[in-house]
Image (cartoon, rainbow, N blue to C red):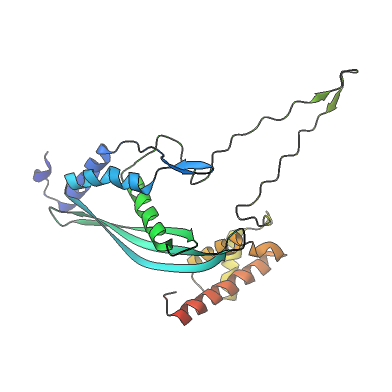
Amino acid sequence: MSENMVSSPKARLYGKIAKVTSEMTRVPKRGTQPKYKFATDTDIVESVRAALTKVNLAVITSMVSYRQMECKTQSGGQQWRTICEFEITLACGDTGEMLTARWFNESLDQSDKGFNKAAAAALKYFFMKTFLITTGEAEESGRETRQQQPPPLPVVDPETGEIVNTQPATPKKQQPRYGQPPQPAAWDWNQVIAKAGDYYKSDSKERFTTCNQLKTEGAFAACKSLDEAARLVAAQVKRNQEQFAAEGLPA
């Protein structure tokens, strides 16, 4: 059945999405970082744009909300964490039928490019997940793929033939991403986030975001209990809300 014979505007829209998906090919990882490679947002957009135009399908991106928080780099410098919520709409140019999806993304930046980075990454991954675009390699979510090293061979005394070293070498302790000490493994972070709501009433999503921010900054290193960690999260949420209110920004 041809597209023109389909009476439902929604069915025609979905059919166009399927056609764009069928035309997608692998996008190589041409972007590089010191420890990994990635598909650039430019390559992803260019791979989709011609197919969208061919079927008369438009893309409309809108920013619904945002938050910005100041945090520190590993060297102690200032940077901004920008968290954005987007609505990305696929609109059929023939029928006017639209399909809108909500998409979140965030960025860390030391200048004024935080919103641009978050928007570019949001559209990139929306296209990749909607039109099933792959790179032909396993996705590592921005981290290098680590290979497990085999244990060292035991050391044998050449005179007696006895094994004098049966213990593998102590693996080098992995440093946290931002240089902070690791948090207590026994803590249940979901309990920390939930308990923080008992000390300061707030949205659970906001407590979750704030908890991750504090973990990134190593703020829990001095906490000796889950209760202290929950109080710290609650206090930071309150400070964030007061700061946004003072600046006239949406909480």
Q: Is residue 66 above or below residue 164?
A: below
- Side of 189 relative to 25 (left or right): right
Q: Is residue 89 visible?
A: yes
Give the camera-side residue of 1 and 75.
Answer: 75
Image coordinates of residue 110 in percent, x first then y, are: 50, 62
**Compared to 86, does 12 lie above or below?**
above
| Quadrant of residue 146 within the rendered picture | top right
From this view, report whether residue 63 is shown above or below residue 247: above
Q: Residue at x 51, y 73 (%)?
A: 202
Left or right of 157, for residue 4 = left
Q: Locate residue 102: give its quadrant.
A: bottom left
Front residue of this view, candidates 184 and 105:
105
- Residue 77 image-quadrant placement: bottom right
Mark yes or no: residue 104 visible. no
Q: Position of residue 159 (x, y in %)?
A: 90, 17
Q: Is residue 170 left or right of residue 78?
A: right
**Quick one: which residue is furthest to the right in this view?**
160
How many numbered marks appear?
0
Write the residue at 11% across / 40% down.
Answer: 2
Residue 234 in the image, given as x and y percentages of width and height: 58, 72
Q: Residue at x 9, y 45 (%)?
A: 4
The C terminus - image quarter = bottom left
Where residue 16 sits: x, y (%)?
Answer: 20, 45
